[in-house]
Amino acid sequence: MSKIEKNTVESNVRPEYDDEIQKIADYVLNYSIDDDSPNSDDAWNTARYCLMDTLGCGLLALRFPECTKHLGPNCADQITPNGARVPGTSYRLDPIKAAFDIGCIVRWLDYNDTWLAAEWGHPSDNLGGILAVADYISQQNISKGHAPLTMRKVLEAMIMAHEIQGVMALDNSFNRVGLDHVFLVKLASTAVVAKLYDLPRERIMAAISQALVDGQALRTYRHAPNAGSRKSWAAGDATSRAVRLVDISRRGEMGIPGALSAPQWGFYDVLFSHTNKDLATKPIDERRFSFQRDFGSYVMENILFKLSFPAEFHAQTACEAAVILHPRVEDRIDDIEKIVLTTHDSAIRIISKEGPLANPADRDHCLQYMVAVPLLTGDLMAENYEDDYHEQHHILIDGLRRKMVVEEDPEYSKDYHDPDKRSIANAIQIFFKDGSSTDKVAIEYPIGHKRRRDEGIPVLEAKFQASLATRFIDSRCKQIVELCNNQVQLEQTPVNEFMDMFVTN
């Protein structure tokens, strides 16, 4: 026999589902937030606030034509009996398109919640699939004489989607292998939407496996010089795709048990190693997803809200510092010699950029732009990213950007990753041509951080009320606010009745 032997056949013994797939399925099927979470009240309450904030962000986005052009049925004049509603509109759509539309408006202004770890993302993006499917199921149930789902089911699905996306993000950096974080939206939405459909364990695992082999989005559209508006609808696309994959699976489509671990063809070999030399040389057991903690309700309890600025979260504290410095520099803009921005490593990697900014999506992911505007005006709003505003003010803004020096503070980077802190620190100090300077204004935790919850919740409530007022008359706004401020009543409300309140003519 030759000393060189070549394997000419593959083993065709079908494996059990990958452990990671089973872990996610068992969590959504078996975990009880009330029985298993030591902070269940905190989880439920925060989910309610998250629901309010996320819907408010979506309503605000409806003011922007670049967003609304994506909404509505795929076919003109399409009628969908018992179709899911898109808040703030009159659309009644199939749940797959409704999930896209809800996810699109929620994410458009980069103003909904955030989770920062080895990977980052916005777990409330999953509300697109959750709310569309829950509304559709509820209306279907009523048409058949059955009870609708209640909003408690929506809140439970939100807590679980947050947990899946957030825990997966703690140790696993998809951005380092070039994948976009909306992969985690697709994964989390698939699991919880399958639960809303009351699918059995095997069907849930089949759906999860489909999400894993589905092909994942690249981050190209989030980074210079290719940053663009796809980043504003990518999460809507991901949560919508999850609804579609669950629909395929509930019809009986077979799953792919080795979706993660299959040699050469699985997720780990194809997408989680070859583009990363450090991972590629490791055995597969060392390339598997790492789970820093068991699934529970930790992520919802500790979620970060964007309360003051529609801006990429790594810049939130920088924007706060800029607002503080505004009155000290507004009459001395021409006297500024240098602006030193001290930040953490993730902010440098994601949003520190120089050169021309081509579109609103480019601007709201530029640290220097997001600091320049509040230094000049004392505030930062979504309108400040639009082309009209940029054309009028780019000379002043770009003048300040050219004077900015970005530096990393290793302690800021360390505390950003510390699970007991999870700070998002930034500092600004401004130096003038006459040799004088401002104090260094440093802010470690943004107002939306859990450490500032007592301060942040009134701001969240005010943000929600202002968002409602952009679409509804006063009496409807009052009705919605009163319901959302009552935890027990909200949880007992049928989903279809809740969605009725957000319909416009």
Image (cartoon, rainbow, N blue to C red):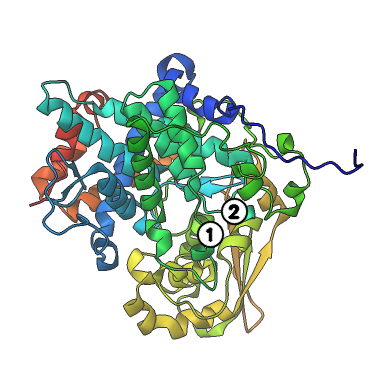
Is the C-beta separation of discs 2 and 1 under 8 Å? Answer: yes
Q: Is 21 situated above or below 341?
A: above
Q: SS of the residue at dot 2?
A: helix
Q: Residue at x 51, y 43 (%)?
A: 213
Q: Residue 172, position in %: x, y?
A: 62, 42
Q: Quick one: 258 or 393, which is closer to the camera?
A: 258
- Residue ID for mark 1: 219
Q: Is residue 422 left or right of residue 77?
A: right
Q: Earlier in the sequence, mark 2 or mark 1?
A: 2
Q: Quadrant of the N terminus?
A: top right
CA distance for labels 2 and 1: 7 Å
- Residue ID for mark 2: 175
Would you say residue 441 is visible in this rendering?
A: no
Q: SS of the residue at dot 1?
A: loop
10 Å crowding of disc 1: few (<14), some (14-19), many (20+):
some
Q: Residue 393, position in %: x, y?
A: 39, 82
Q: Amino acid at mark 2?
A: Asn
Q: Residue at x 12, y 40 (%)?
A: 81
Q: Is residue 89 left or right of residue 45?
A: left
Query: Image quarter for residue 31?
Result: top left
